[in-house]
Amino acid sequence: MREVAAEFRNPVLLYSIGKDSSVMLHLALKAFYPARLPFPLLHVDTTWKFRQMIEFRDETVKRLGLNLLVHVNQCGIDDGINPISSGSALHTQVMKTESLKQALDCHGFDAIFGGARRDEERARAKERIFSVRSPGHVWDPRNQRPELWNLFNTRIRTGESMRVFPLSNWTELDVWEYIRHEKISVVPLYFAKPRPVVRRNGALIMVDDHRLPLAPNETPELKSIRFRTLGCYPLSGAIESAAATIDDIIAEMQVTKTSERQGRLIDNDEAASMERKKRDGYF
Amino acid sequence: MRLDGKDQLRFITCGSVDDGKSTLIGRLLHDSSSIRDDELKALARDSLKYGTTGEEIDFALVVDGLEAERQQAITIDVAYRYFSTGRRSFMVADTPGHEQYTRNMATAASNAQLAVILIDASKGVLVQTKRHSLICSLLGVRHVVLAVNKMDLVGYGKESFDRAVADYRAFASALGFLSIAAIPISARYGDNVTGRSEATGWYKGPCLLHHLESINAQPNTADQPFRFAVQWVNRPSRAFRGYAGAVVSGSIEVGGEIVVARSGRSSRVEKIVTYDGELARAEPGSAVTITLADDIDVGRGDVLADPLNQPEVSDQFAAYVIWMDQQAMAVGRPYAFRIGAQSIASGHIRATRHKIDINTGAQIEAHALSFNEIGLCDIALATPACVDSYKKNRHTGSFIIIDRYTNRTVGAGMIALELRRIGGIGRPPLPLGKSERSALKQQRACIIWLTGEHGKAAIGNLVEQKLFELAHHTMLLEAGNVGIAVGETNRKEDVWRIGQIAKLMVDAGLIVICALPCPTSTSRDHVRALVSAAEFIEVFVDDQNGGCVQHDNCEMHAKAGLPELLKVADASSEPPLRHLEAAGHGPHRLAEIVLGYLVEKGIITR
């Protein structure tokens, strides 16, 4: 992180409010202490995040005195794009990928920290820690720079940008163990609690506000659930769990038989869908 | 040490294309319960579509991530995977066996402590096996597991195994590995991977996973001399000035003596600051902020070191270099170097002493290295860097080479300091000539001599302007700035004088554009003789009616390809004369044609 602050003109930390972002923010605070963060945070808001995420974000920013930029793709809003009637693929494309590109272009960031980890998904397993994006934010997996030792090639041309993934070599379990060790606060949705949910396509969807249209035969049930990853609430599947503390979560993870992104409806659209999204500019 | 109290082993797997590396990793992940149910389901689906194992699950697909390579069924890049057992956590880098991708293997090996080298029991030790072992050895991997795979294909016979192992040991004995463990396995059926197999009753050693769990492969960085790489100067206020960085080897205590390696200035550690409070001591691997008792000059890239055991501060050293770019190394051309946090904007490879035949380890005479070649090179930097030999310190002994033009990482190096002392390169001054000066400017020096009645000055100006925009170093000589007289009688003398000036500028590495009246071919020949044939480019601007300047906005002709417009006139018109047909083209178009010609002749690159 210090490498980026020292070598780039205008870095930014992409803050998605999730646990990985919380860890990254914590690492950044540690890296620059006692100085303040030498770069802002950027949240790309789809307007469909869980309400508790937004509360948590605003509380964190206030508590730590951070400089947070929030970007919403207004064109997408105007076009009425939403995860329910537009479908998850279009919603993600417009409100996340396009929106992110808009925000990056608008502020002219040349280095962007992301919390992606190689253990999340197969396409991410091949990602570099310092990954160059062409002026259109396109990723070319066949033309990546070799990364040896901890020596990073930070040189880019005008218009290009660098995506930096400091957590590349962490696993989901590492993240939780670090959160426990460092006592980092995370969104309460990661911890189990009775919440109203409906079951759709095998996933448990939380009824976070009145915008989620319910089918005539659907009635929200109260179940003890928690989330392993957080995104837009209509697209984030919960798991039934009783893990109400970090210790419970870690214990649960050690016996779990499903992967973290399994609850993410957007990844399952088709095989290699993450790779396509990444080539397009998604994180 | 990790937070869960388990240590981590980083290892790579290497082998030839069909040796079954990916299958082995998939098997390790599967048998250590690291593949989740939903991933397994997706895998079963994909196995039917892409797999090479029929109805069974193809474990190779766990690792072969990218779509394109899945269809090719070849791993083309480095893929990282993580799993853990009750005793250890593991980070696996799957490295390609494909001959073309040596650079990826070196990348993976640079952060690995151990290598699992696969060979096919039915084929034995292959050229690639030797190549991979040599790269591992060079990059400082000290522990090897020789996994003799596909034992099922040789009926689990002891003889095939013994033969392969004996061949391998004979080759690897010179590579300086601290341990070589040979294990007979079948990745496809799981023999000796995560448990001992009945099929190889004659084998008495541990299974692969057990060996990986128990081997002590951690390098002992704590006992090495103290090195602290300064990444960032932390100055939140006037009252605080700290140096943020990482302890790369050794350790330091509050009050400990340090020396700034580059300047030789010394001081004591006043405080070791972290977010969680001050520390009394910092161990290797910790990222801390150090404040010093004295106000001395320290910046990003500096190395704080043990005063009794300092790194070398040198602008010249010998190093083993792995060339990783399609474009071959250019000796003498400036490259950027990255050594720890030290970014050296400019340096060059002075000479290649030899390259290494990676199949035999033999030294071969070479002038420069091509893609995927490894050799011993002499490096010269524009400013001194703090370095150790790679054998002593992986952090301060390694560097990467970056092309200043494309920004690609073109090479990686491992410093071999002891060789410098034995070999005694000394520091003879680099003889500076035309080629060195041109190389610095990333161009080839030449004279572009424009002739013709009209349009020379306009085109000459535009050519210079366009070259400038492409960051080339130029000089335009025209009647105005060299102050030649108008009288006809003086012209021959003028041409001679300007020729001398142009030659001097070519020696300085410049692209010289001459837009002058030069009536006779004899006087041009005089200039031509001052430089080499390739450095004199004569362009005849054929613009009889002087229309070129006025017609800047005229439509470009579709047929305006280089061969038609910029042609060598027939042999009868004495010297080679490049004929620039101006009719119907604006000067911008004509200048572009000249530029295209320069690219074609390798004077400049785009």
Image: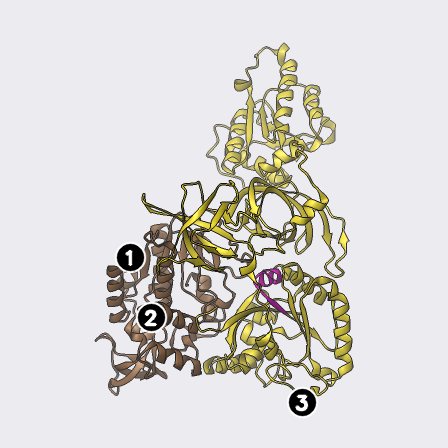
Q: Closer to the camera, B295 or B530?
A: B295
Boundaries of the magenta span: B104-115
Give the color of chain B as drawn: yellow
Outermost residue on the left side: it is A210
Residue A38 in the image, given as x and y percentages of width and height: 35, 51
Amino acid type assigned to the residue bearing label 1 in the image: Leu
> Image quadrant for the C terminus of chain A?
bottom left
* Residue found 70% across the figure and 86% down from its top: B200
Q: Which of the chains bears the disc numbered 2?
A: A
Residue A176 in the image, given as x and y percentages of width and height: 39, 72
Q: Is residue B141 above or below residue B403?
A: below
Neighbour tally class for label 2: few under 14, some 14-19, many 20 plus, Cα within 10 Å: many
Q: Quadrant of residue B129?
A: bottom right
Res. A68 mark: 1
Q: Secondary structure at mark 1?
A: strand
Q: Are marks 3 and 2 on the same chain?
A: no
Give the color of chain A as drawn: brown
Separation (CA) of disc 3 from disc 1: 61 Å
Horizontally, residue B583 falls left or right of residue B522, namely left
Res. B98 mark: none
Separation (CA) of disc 3 from disc 2: 49 Å
